[in-house]
Amino acid sequence: MAVSDQDEKQLRIDLAAAYRLLDLNNWSDMIFTHLSARVPGSEDRFLLNAYGLLPEEVCASNLIEVDVKGENANISPESVNPAGFTIHSALHLAREDAHCVMHTHTMAGMAVSALEEGLLPVNQTNMEFYNRVAYYDYQGVPLECDEREAIVAAMGDKNSMILRNHGLLTVGRSVEEAFYRMYYLNKACEIQVEAMKTGGKLLLPDDDVCEHVAEQMANPRYNAQSIDLIWKAMLRKLDRIDTSYRD
C-alpha cells in the first residue's frame, strides 16, 4: 500500500495529541519525557519531540524527523534528547510492530520501578499485565547506542516494560495502542502504590485467576474496540480544550 503525505500528517497529529495527553494526565517530566513514532513507509526515520519543548508545546508541525543515529534528518537546528532516542530507537529498529514507543517518568511508575517485587496483581487493572511486563535493570543514563541490544533482549516480545529505578515504557502498532498500554500500566502502578500505602496485607488472587483475566483483556476484538473508542474519546476531549496540537 502506497504511503501518502496524509498518512504522515495524521501520524503527526496523533503523536502530538499523545504529548498533550501526557501533559493532561500529569505524566510530564518537564522536557525529559519522550514519545516517538516511525515515519509511515520508512524503516529508519522516526518522529520525536524537539529537545527543550514541554509536552504542552508539542504540535504536529514541530515534531522532528530523526535518523537511526538520532540526528535531525531535515535541515533545521533542532535536536532531540540523546538518552531518550537510545531507548526508543532500540525498539523501533528491533521490533517491526513497534511503530510507536512511549516512555514516561510518572510518580507511580517510578515508585513501582523501585520495588523488588515489581508490579503486583492487586487489582483487575494490574492483572491485564500479569506475566506480560518486561523488566530492565538500571545501567545509568542510556546515552550509548550500544545499550540498544540489552534493552531489546530484556523487552523480548512483550509490549510493556518497567525500567527499574527509572520509569515505564510501552510499544504499539499505533500511537493509540501504545497510549492505551501506557495509560493502564501507569494506572496499575497507581493502584498498587495506593494499596501499599494502607499498610495492610495485600490480597493477591491465585495465578490461574490472574492469567485468566490477562487472557480476557488480551482478546483481540475487545482490545481493539476498547483502544479505538478510548482514543477517539481522548481526541474529543483535547479538541474541547485546545486544538493547537493539530497545527
Image: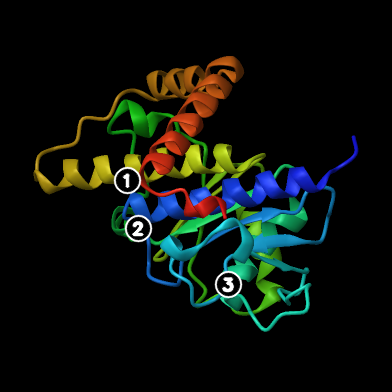
The mark lying in front, picked from 3 and 1, is 3
Q: Is residue 109 above or below residue 231?
A: below
**Would residue 156 appear left or right of 184 to someone viewing this image?**
right
Q: Residue under label 3, please give it.
A: 50
How is this picture coloured? rainbow
Q: Residue under label 1, please give it.
A: 189
Q: Residue under label 2, please give it.
A: 106
- Marks 1 and 2: in contact by CB < 8 Å? yes
Q: Amino acid at mark 1?
A: Cys
State how far apart marks 3 and 2 are (Cα): 20 Å
How many dots with numbers? Answer: 3
The mark lying in front, picked from 3 and 2, is 3
Q: Amino acid at mark 3?
A: Ala
Q: Amino acid at mark 2?
A: Thr
| Viewport quadrant of the N terminus | top right
Kindly give the residue lying farthest to the right in the view shown: 2
Question: In this orientation, which residue lies closer to the viewer: 178 or 151?
Answer: 178
Secondary structure of the residue carrying tag 2 is loop
**Would residue 5 appear left or right of 60 to someone viewing this image?**
right
Q: Earlier along the polypeptide chain: callout 3 or callout 1?
A: 3
| Residue drawn at point x = 49 percent, y = 77 percent | 52
Q: Earlier along the polypeptide chain: callout 2 or callout 1?
A: 2
Image coordinates of residue 92 in percent, x first then y, are 71, 55
| Residue drawn at point x = 73 percent, y = 75 percent | 72
Q: Is residue 212 above or below residue 118?
A: above
Tell me the quarter of the picture where residue 64 sits: bottom right
